[in-house]
Image (tube, coloured by chain):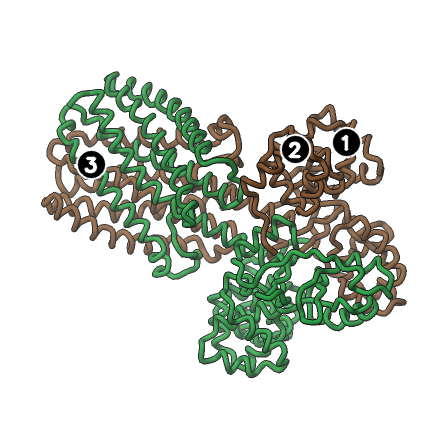
Chain colours: A brown, B green
Amino acid sequence: MTPFKLTDELLEEIRQLIAEKKNAGLQAMMKEFHYADIAEIADELEVEEATYLIKLLDSEKTSDILAEMHEDIREAVLKNLTAKEIAGELSELDTDDAADIINELPKELVQEVISEIEDRDHAKDIVDLLRYEEDSAGGLMAKELVKVNENWTVTTCIKEMRAQAENVTRVHSIYVVDDEGKLKGRLSLKDLLTTSSKTHIKDVYIPKVDSVNVNEKGEEVAKIMSKYDLEAIPVVDEIGRLVGRITIDDIVDVIREEADKDYQMAAGISQDVEVSDSIWILTRARLPWLILGLLGGLGAAAIMGTFEDMISKHAVLFFFTPLIAAMAGNVGVQSSAIVVQGLANDDLKGSVRNHLIKEMLLALLNGFILAILLLLFTWIWKGAFATALAISLSLIVVIVVAGFIGTFIPLFLNKRNIDPAIATGPFITTSNDIFGILIYFWIAKMILGI
Amino acid sequence: MTPFKLTDELLEEIRQLIAEKKNAGLQAMMKEFHYADIAEIADELEVEEATYLIKLLDSEKTSDILAEMHEDIREAVLKNLTAKEIAGELSELDTDDAADIINELPKELVQEVISEIEDRDHAKDIVDLLRYEEDSAGGLMAKELVKVNENWTVTTCIKEMRAQAENVTRVHSIYVVDDEGKLKGRLSLKDLLTTSSKTHIKDVYIPKVDSVNVNEKGEEVAKIMSKYDLEAIPVVDEIGRLVGRITIDDIVDVIREEADKDYQMAAGISQDVEVSDSIWILTRARLPWLILGLLGGLGAAAIMGTFEDMISKHAVLFFFTPLIAAMAGNVGVQSSAIVVQGLANDDLKGSVRNHLIKEMLLALLNGFILAILLLLFTWIWKGAFATALAISLSLIVVIVVAGFIGTFIPLFLNKRNIDPAIATGPFITTSNDIFGILIYFWIAKMILGI
C-alpha cells in the first residue's frame, strides 16, 4: 500500500473540479480515496468547497468523513447543512461519533436534528450518550455492541448475532448478560468457532470479564485497557447493567491527547491548544506562564540588587547570572520531567526518599563535571582563580538544589492529588532561577568576601 | 471491576509467603490475579523472589508475566533459568513477544534456547522475526494470523480457521491470499457471519486491504493505523506475500514511546531513559544538554563582558539579564513545542510563511503585554523611567526574535528531514539566551547612550 499523500497539485486539481462543478469527475476521484484521506482534503479546502464536496457524496461515506475532519472545519460545514441533512449523516455514524458531533451543534439545533433521525432506537441511544462527561467512560463509549443472553444456545446466539452484527463495525468480544441486562461475562470469537452448536451459552461463557464503570475517567480507562492489552471494554452502570462499549481506537486518541497535554504543560502552554487555534486562544494559553517567568525575573533582579555592593569589585559575578539561572532551570526541568513521566506511566516505584537520594547523586555527579569545565574556562578566560572557584563551587550547590526541587515538587504535588505536570517547565524554571541566583551570590560572597 | 492496586501490605504478604516457601498459598493467591498484575508484583520483588515465583507458577501464565515485566528485571530473572526453561516460556508466547525476549538474551544462549523449543514451526517463525529492526514493521509484527485461500469455500474456510484460531489470541480480520501466498484482500467477521456457507471466498472477499511493507518504520505504521482506525494491519514482504500482522496493542506502545521520547527531548534528556535506569545511563542522557547550556551561559557572559563599560552607570541593566534570558527561553520553548507537536501529529497545514507570521503576531501581543507590566514594575521600583523603558522595549524585540527562532528552527529541521524534536528544550533555550542578551544590551545601549 502506498500511503496517501496530499500534494499541492492534488489539492489544486480538486479545487478546480469543484469550481467547475465537475461532479462526475469528483465522485469518481473520491471513490478511490479512504474517508480519512477525504477528511484530510476537506480540512484544507475552503468551507464552501468542503460543503460542496460533502453535499455531493453519498452520506454513507460523508458521515465518516465528517467524523474524521478537524473540529473547527466540521462545525463550519455543518452550519451549511439543514437539520435533516445533519440527521442523515448522524444516522450513518456509530452512536459515540454521532453524540460527539451533536455536542458541537448550537443548542437550538440539537432537538431538531435528533427529531429528524429516522431510526428512533439510534436516536434514543445517541440521546443517552449526551448526558455523560466528554472525558468519562460514558462519554467515550458507543452503544453498538453484540450481546447474548446466558440462557440462549450457541445456535440461537449465532442467529441473533448476525442481526446485531449488521449494526456493529467491529465485533470484538461477545458479551453475555442475564435477563436483567447485567453483565455476566464474555464469549470470545474463538469460543464461538470451536464450540458445538447445541451448547448453552451459560455453560461456555467466560465468567470473568474486565469492565469499567460509566463514570470512570477516560485516562483511567486508557491505563486499564493498555495494561491488560484490551481492544474493547464493556461499560456498566451503577448496578452492573451493560450500557456500552469502548474500543481501543478511541483510547488511542485519549493516550495521544494526554501525552500532548503533558508535553504542552512542560513547554509552558496551559489548556489543550493546537497550532491552528486563534491567536487569542494561543495567547491565553501561554501568557500566564510568561507572566510567572516575568515575576521570577523580577525576583532575581531584586536579589541581585541586594548584592549590588559586590558589583564594583566582582562585576564578573554578574555576567554569570544567566548561566547559573539556565543551569538551575535545565537541571530542574530534567529532574521534574523524568518524575512526571514516571508517574504518568506508573513506572515510579519505591520510596520517595530513594528517588530524592538518587536524583541528588545524579545532580552531584553532573554538577561536579560541569563545575570543573566552568572552572577551567573561567580561569583561562578571566585569569582570576578565586572568582572562578567561587562561581564553580556555587554551580555545584545550585545544581544539587535544582535537582532536589525538580524531583521533590512533582512528587509532593502527586501525593496531594494535584496533577504533577503543572510542576514542569516554567514553574520549575522560574523557582529554580530565583533559588539558584540567591544561592550563587550567597556562596560567592562567603568565598570572596564583600 | 475494582482495579488492582499493589499495596505495601500485599507486597509484604507475598514476600512472607515466598520466604516461608508456602507454595500452595502463593499459587492460590496468584490464581486470582491477572498476569499483568503479577508482572507488576514481580517488578517490585527481589530478583531471587521473582525467580522463585516464576518457577513456581505454570508456564502458561508465567510466559505472559515475563512478557509484561520490566525489561531489566526480566533479564535478571531469565539469567536464573535454564535454556530449557526459557524455551518452555517462549513456546507459550506469541512470536513477536518471544522474539523480543530472545533479543535480550546473551548471544551465546540464543541458539541453545531456540533449539530447545519443541514446536519447530514456532521456533522457525521466531527466528524469522529476529532479522528485522526492532523499530520496523517486521520488528513489531507477529507471525500468528488467520489466512484463507481465495479458492476455498466458506465451509472449508471456517474449518481451517478453527484450526488456525487455536494459535491466535485475537482473530481480527481474516486475510485472503492466493496460491503463492500473496495478500489479495480480507474477510471481515461480519462477512463470515452473514454469508451462505457454499460461497467461494474469491466471490465474497474485500479486495481492498491496507497493508504495510515489512521495512516500514514503526512510527509510520502507528500513523497509518490510527489514521485509518485499524486494529490490525497485515505486513507484506517486497513481493507482496503476507508475512505477519501487527495489532493495535503493539502500536499503543509505539505511540507512548514516541510521545515519551519527544517529551524527554523537550526536557533536555536524550536517549530513551526511565526513572529506574542507572545513574550512569541517566547522566549520559542529560549531561550533553547541560554542557550545551553551560556553553550558552559562557557565551552570554562573554557578551555581557563587552558591555562592561555600562555597568557603572546602569548596573540595573545587569540585574535584568536572567529575566531577559528566561523570557527568551520560555517564548522559544512555547513556539517550538507547538510546532514540534503539530509536525508529530500531522496537524501542521499551510505554508511556513503563514506560521511564522502568526507566531510573530502572537509574540508581539505577548511581548507588548509583558513589556507594559515590566515597565510599570521597574518604574515604580527603581524610579528611573528611561532605564525602565529601555528594558521594556528590548523585551518586546527579544520576545519577537525568540518566537521567530522557536518557530523557524523546527520547521527548518523538518524540511531537511532532521527530527525537529531536537530543537526543543535546551537547544532553543540556549540559543535564545544568547540572542536575547545580545539584543537586550544592544537596544538598551542605543536608548541610554554609553
User: Residue B401 at what x, y percent from top left?
Assistant: 34, 32
For mark 2, name the chain. A
Q: Residues within 10 Å of mark 3 (few under 14, many from 20)?
A: some
Callout 3 secondary element: helix
| Distance between mark 1 and mark 2 Cα atoms | 20 Å
| Distance between mark 3 and mark 2 Cα atoms | 58 Å
Residue type at numbered disc 2: Ile
User: Residue A50 at what x, y percent from top left?
Assistant: 65, 33
**In the shown orientation, is residue A292 left or right of residue B244?**
left
Question: Is residue B253 depicted above or below B125 in this figure?
Answer: above
User: Residue B257 at what x, y percent from top left?
Assistant: 50, 54
Whether the residues at callouts 1 and 2 have beta carbons within 8 Å, the answer is no
Whether the residues at callouts 3 and 2 have beta carbons within 8 Å, the answer is no
Label 1 sits on residue: A85
Label 3 sits on residue: B303
Marks 3 and 2 belong to one chain: no
Callout 2 secondary element: helix
Residue type at numbered disc 3: Ile
Q: Which corner quadrant of the image does residue B205 belong to?
A: bottom right
Mark 1 or 2, nearer chain start: 2
Label 2 sits on residue: A18
Foreground: disc 1 or disc 2: 2
**In the shown orientation, is residue A14 left or right of residue B262?**
right
For mark 3, name the chain. B
As rendered, which of B163 and A412 lies closer to the eye?
B163
Callout 1 secondary element: helix
